[in-house]
């Protein structure tokens, strides 16, 4: 039990995180706004002042909304997107390769991931830098992020109005065509905003961690440069070790006895996916990177009905960018510590 952010139970072991994540009936993602009216505070710690569908929906709304979205993220859909991802990646490399230095965040991974996400949702790819700014979560970036989110919400309001009249062939158009009564204009905007943020954070975090790890571990980088077949395993292992979504919250709907404690109905519960992925009872030498780890039953993409909707797309983006990087600049290294002082979501510089 942690006495912070209103108090919550923290679940760290692999088996319990896996079990609780699958049990959406006992551990709800529901978010009742305004915060504090009920105990249902959604998936964020601390709770967000806005709704994040479908992440913060339970069935039946979650089932309906997920069914409307899933075809856009299916394996077949991602395969059709691969040429576009490859073209964007090539363009980013062509712009920076002669400089001997690369801004990995703004110049590569965010431009690819943000552009693909914007096009999926139904917004102009010209907003890629705005979305990259909005995805910044560091305190020093809060002003920039606030301005960027204001711009994105303005654009989303207009996009929903236009698609109510003439739905396009993208996610906003799909949602505007739906007859589901809960899909109000506000809900569509919130859903689109959630998808934009997810597409500009989770795969980006993974890729930045891949670059940071390989940039400081020459032998592993050269191993992957020589052995292309090992790269999918490497991505899965780095997903396990650097889980992009480290925690996610739930609300208990009933009393649950576990580990000698009693979780009461209404208690907040935080699932530690990052901790579970380093559980020594499941993963031998859990803090070591083992590209040949098999089996690798990590849960970095979640479990149950809230399993990451964009898992296939994120993996494709990571593999395409990693392949191109190791083909073009297998000897890259991290730039100076001063250039790379901020962790996670911020500009990451490499040299080659």
Image (spheres, helix red, strand yellow):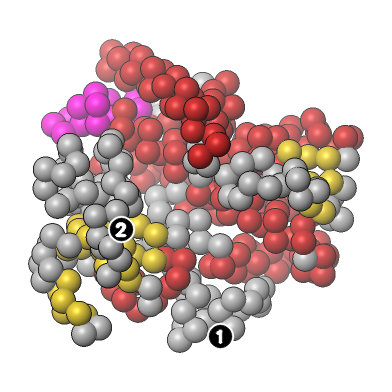
Read off the residue under disc 1: 284
The CA distance from mark 1 to mark 2 is: 32 Å
- The percent position of residue 225, horizontal first and vertical second, equals 81, 61
**Please, is residue 14 above or below residue 60 in the view?**
below
Determine crowd level at label 2: few under 14, some 14-19, many 20+ residues with C-alpha closer than 10 A.
Answer: few
**Please, is residue 248 above or below residue 146 in the view?**
below
- The percent position of residue 128, horizontal first and vertical second, equals 57, 28
- Residue 248 falls in which quadrant of the image? bottom left
Which residue is pictured at 24% across the width and 55% down the height? 6
Which residue is pictured at 51% across the width and 61% down the height? 243
Disc 1, SS: loop
Q: Nearer the viewer, residue 44 or 328?
A: 44
Check if residue 173 falls in the magenta segment. yes
Which range is magenta? 172-188
- The percent position of residue 352, horizontal first and vertical second, equals 87, 48
Determine if residue 251 is in view.
yes
């Amino acid at each position: 039990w942690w006495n912070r952010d209103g108090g919550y139970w923290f679940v760290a072991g692999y088996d319990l995180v896996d079990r609780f994540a699958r049990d959406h009936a006992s551990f709800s993602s529901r978010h009742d706004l305004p915060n504090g009216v009920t105990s249902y505070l959604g998936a964020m710690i601390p709770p967000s002042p806005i709704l994040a569908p479908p992440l913060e929906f339970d069935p039946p709304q979650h089932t309906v909304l997920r069914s409307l979205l899933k075809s856009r993220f299916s394996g077949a859909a991602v395969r059709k997107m691969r040429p576009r991802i490859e073209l964007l990646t090539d363009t980013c490399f062509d712009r920076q390769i002669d400089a001997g230095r690369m801004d990995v965040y703004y110049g590569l991974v965010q431009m690819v991931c943000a552009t693909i996400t914007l096009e999926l949702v139904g917004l102009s790819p010209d907003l890629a830098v705005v979305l990259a700014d909005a995805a910044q979560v560091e305190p020093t970036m809060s002003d920039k992020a606030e301005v960027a989110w204001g711009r994105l919400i303005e654009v989303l309001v207009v996009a929903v109005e236009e698609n109510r009249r003439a739905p396009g062939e993208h996610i906003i158009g799909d949602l505007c065509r739906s007859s589901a009564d809960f899909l109000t204009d506000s809900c569509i905007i919130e859903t689109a905003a959630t998808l934009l943020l997810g597409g500009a954070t989770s795969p980006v975090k993974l890729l930045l961690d891949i670059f940071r790890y390989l940039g400081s571990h020459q032998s592993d980088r050269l191993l992957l440069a020589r052995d292309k077949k090992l790269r999918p395993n490497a991505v899965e292992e780095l997903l396990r070790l650097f889980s992009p979504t480290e925690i996610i919250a739930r609300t208990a709907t009933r009393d649950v006895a576990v580990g000698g404690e009693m979780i009461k109905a209404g208690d907040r519960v935080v699932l530690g996916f990052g901790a579970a992925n380093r559980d020594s009872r499941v993963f031998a030498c859990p803090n070591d990177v083992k590209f040949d780890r098999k089996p690798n039953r990590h849960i970095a993409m979640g479990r149950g009905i809230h399993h990451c909707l964009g898992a296939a797309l994120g993996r494709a983006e990571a593999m395409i960018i990693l392949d191109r990087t190791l083909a073009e600049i297998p000897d890259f290294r991290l730039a100076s510590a001063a250039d790379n002082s901020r962790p996670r979501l911020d500009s990451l510089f490499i040299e080659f």
